[in-house]
Image (cartoon, grey):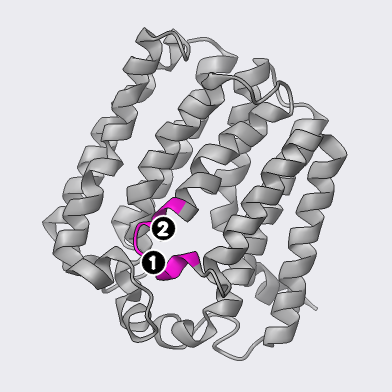
């Protein structure tokens, strides 16, 4: 039983569930200005389950690619069957939708749209990940923009520009940051027709293309403050641009290094910048620093 549990945990990739939880909570705090309540915690759990479903779904449809790129994962290593994996993904998707339905119609619709995007990111016939730029957008929208809006929807109507503006900043950031995971997958992606930026343009040019997205989006924060779209207390988050610039230079310094390991240091910086921005956003609205 413990062995099976470890396999399921490996499938859902627990570390990747932190960002959707924190992002959802941040969106809620933006709208309410208070500590998350039980409805918000349910919503955050729904977001985490949805991300887990996406992870399992991606591994199911990328089995042949993972045999080359990540043979140690549960499916290509034969530790779990494809049938069990897709059933598990279906259970996770369904659980996320049910939880969101219990909270509000607005949240349910957001989760439904997100589920559609994340499912067809990997699944044919759409398989968004096959196409450069479309692949990046299909990651940035649900994990950047819609996540903040989803948290906001628990407390207020989504017909406000504030969550969409903040969501846009995170989405633009992820437009570039999401590509950092593609460098180490060039071998399998190129063989199976997945046209990521590193596959199409090579590591050096791809690194140059994504670099501006790692820091420029955070420079929109002062713009949002000046236009009175977001609070003055969010202004310190503009300094994330410095961290993003450091990460961008790290990538451009040696793009070939990203092709050699799955969790390159730049990917870790990318993920920490995302979570740091989400936490900083929550603090700005909760404590009004």
Q: Which residue is mark 1?
A: 131
In percent of the image, x 53 and y 69: which residue is there? 126
**Residue situated in front as seen by the camera: 210 or 242:** 210
Q: Which residue is mark 2?
A: 134
Q: Is residue 5 magenta?
A: no
Toward the bottom, the furthest residue is 78
Q: Main secondary structure of the magenta part?
A: helix
- Element under label 1? loop
In percent of the image, x 60 and y 81: which residue is there? 74
**Residue situated in front as seen by the camera: 89 or 280:** 89
CB of mark 2 within 8 Å of CB of mark 1? yes
User: Residue 104: where, in percent of width, then height?
Assistant: 81, 34
Q: In this rendering, would 168 be left or right of 18?
A: left
| In the rendered image, the vertical position of residue 289 relative to residue 250, given as above or below | above
Magenta range is 128-137
| In the rendered image, the vertical position of residue 60 relative to residue 248, given as above or below | below
- Asked whether the viewer can see residue 3, the reply is no
- Element under label 2? helix
| In the rendered image, the vertical position of residue 288 relative to residue 133, given as above or below | above
Please tell me how crowded label 1 is: few (under 14), some (14-19), or many (20+) other residues with Cα within 10 Å. Answer: some
User: Residue 59: where, in percent of width, then height?
Assistant: 56, 75
């Amino acid at each position: 039983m413990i062995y099976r549990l470890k396999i399921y945990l490996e499938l859902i990739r627990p570390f990747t569930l932190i960002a959707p939880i924190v992002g959802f909570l941040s969106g809620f705090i933006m709208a309410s200005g208070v500590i998350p309540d039980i409805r918000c915690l349910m919503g955050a759990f729904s977001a985490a389950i949805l991300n887990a479903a996406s992870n399992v779904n991606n591994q199911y449809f990328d089995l042949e690619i993972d045999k080359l790129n990540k043979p140690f994962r549960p499916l290509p290593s034969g530790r779990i069957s494809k049938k069990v994996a897709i059933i598990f993904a279906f259970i996770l998707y369904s659980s996320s939708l049910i939880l969101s339905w219990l909270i509000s119609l607005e949240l349910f619709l957001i989760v439904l749209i997100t589920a559609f995007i994340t499912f067809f990111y990997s699944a044919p016939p759409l398989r968004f990940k096959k196409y450069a730029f479309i692949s990046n957008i299909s990651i940035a929208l649900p994990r950047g923009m819609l996540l903040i809006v989803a948290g906001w929807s628990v407390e207020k109507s989504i017909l406000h520009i504030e969550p969409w503006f903040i969501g846009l900043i995170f989405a633009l950031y992820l437009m570039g940051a999401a590509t950092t995971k593609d460098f180490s997958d060039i071998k399998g992606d190129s063989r199976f027709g997945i046209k990521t930026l590193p596959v199409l343009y090579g590591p050096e040019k791809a690194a140059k293309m994504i670099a501006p997205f790692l820091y420029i989006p955070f420079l929109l924060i002062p713009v949002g403050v000046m236009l009175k779209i977001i609070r003055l207390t969010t202004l310190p988050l503009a300094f994330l641009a410095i961290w993003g610039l450091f990460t961008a230079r790290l990538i451009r310094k040696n793009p070939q290094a990203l092709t050699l390991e799955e969790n390159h240091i730049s990917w870790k910086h990318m993920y920490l910048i995302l979570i740091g921005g989400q936490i900083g956003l929550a603090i700005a609205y909760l404590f009004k620093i």
